[in-house]
Image: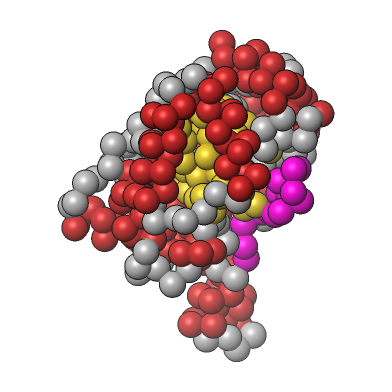
Amino acid sequence: MKVIYNRREILKLSVLAGIGLSFRTVDTLMFDSKVLTRPIPSSGESLPAVGLGTWQTFDVGSSSEQRKILSQVLKELHRFGGAVIDSSPMYGSSEKVVGDLTSELNFKDQLFYATKVWTSGQRSGVAQMEASMKKMGRSTMDLIQIHNLVDWNTHVKTLKQWKEQGKIRYWGITHYVDSSHASLEAIIKSERPDFVQFNYSILSRHAEKSLFDTAKKYGVATIINQPYAGGSLFRKVRGKELPDWTKEWDINSWGQYFLKFILSNPAVTCAIPGTSKPHHMIDNMKAGLGKIPDEATRMKMVKHLKSL
């Protein structure tokens, strides 16, 4: 794959070349860094802080051309030290595509597989989860989450049993709208899941009111969906240049700007932007490299974005 470097990287290459390193060596060094990790509170296990969502992006059915591109997306995720792949039976063929593609990768067992249960009833839930595990090629699933809290009272019982039996390593709950944050908090307090997944972005910060605090208090890992607010953040900055001061924080694209803001919140365990493009996967992963903005810079980032 041809690698295109930005101005900052070209400068670094020239310096390294000046001390006698070959381009091949320099290229290896450029990608030696691994993405930031955060601990899963319930176990202490380290989890890469940038992962991959598969909603829409991996729903490609049997298309060999699209599957080839998605395989490269997975390779870029792994190359930067990423691991989390989040899917759902709601996402069409995504689970099957993930399972088929990862089965061909020599690092398949180094990935962290997450999916969801999205149905009502105990029997239906068990059948759906077993089908998801088969589609994704897993005898043990890393994480199963209750998608949008559908029949959560029923599925909690099954997931707790499955964790005790070793069929899953972790269980969690999810939603994607601010109005459900209170429900997520209530379930965290009563059921103590390992993970909670919810919406959060630089201009959608409702979770900062109390959801993050509740997750931290009860030792629950956080997965962030909709980090780009459904693409609206990119529409807002279309045609706009990054301010010069972002280079101080290793921010070289608007995507990194948005993700670095999320990762600069220490209560975030992992963000899962979705993509079907290898160069976007590279850009996303680079948000987890280098300096992470401090609190003053976080507020500066918000202020600048609102001014556009």
Residue at 52 percent across and 86 percent down: it is 22
Residue at 65 percent across and 13 percent down: it is 182
* Pick the front one: 24 or 90: 90
The secondary structure that dominates the magenta segment is: loop
Relative to 191, say whether 276 is above or below: below
Q: Which x, y percent locates residue 177?
A: 52, 17
Relative to 101, say whether 237 is above or below: above
**Magenta run includes residue 259:** no
* Pick the front one: 289 or 193: 193
**Residue ranking furthest to the bottom:** 20
In screen coordinates, is 124 left or right of 272?
left
Q: Quadrant of residue 89?
A: top left
Q: Which x, y percent locates residue 308?
A: 52, 22
Relative to 167, say whether 217 is above or below: above
Residue at 42 percent across and 48 percent down: it is 133
In screen coordinates, is 248 left or right of 20?
right
Residue 82, visible in the rendered structure: yes
**Residue ranking furthest to the top:** 179
Relative to 157, say whether 81 is above or below: below
Protein image colouring: secondary structure
**Residue ranking furthest to the right:** 217
Q: Which x, y percent locates residue 62?
A: 19, 51
Q: What is the magenta range? A: 33-46
Q: Which x, y percent locates residue 11?
A: 57, 67
* Pick the front one: 97 or 22: 97
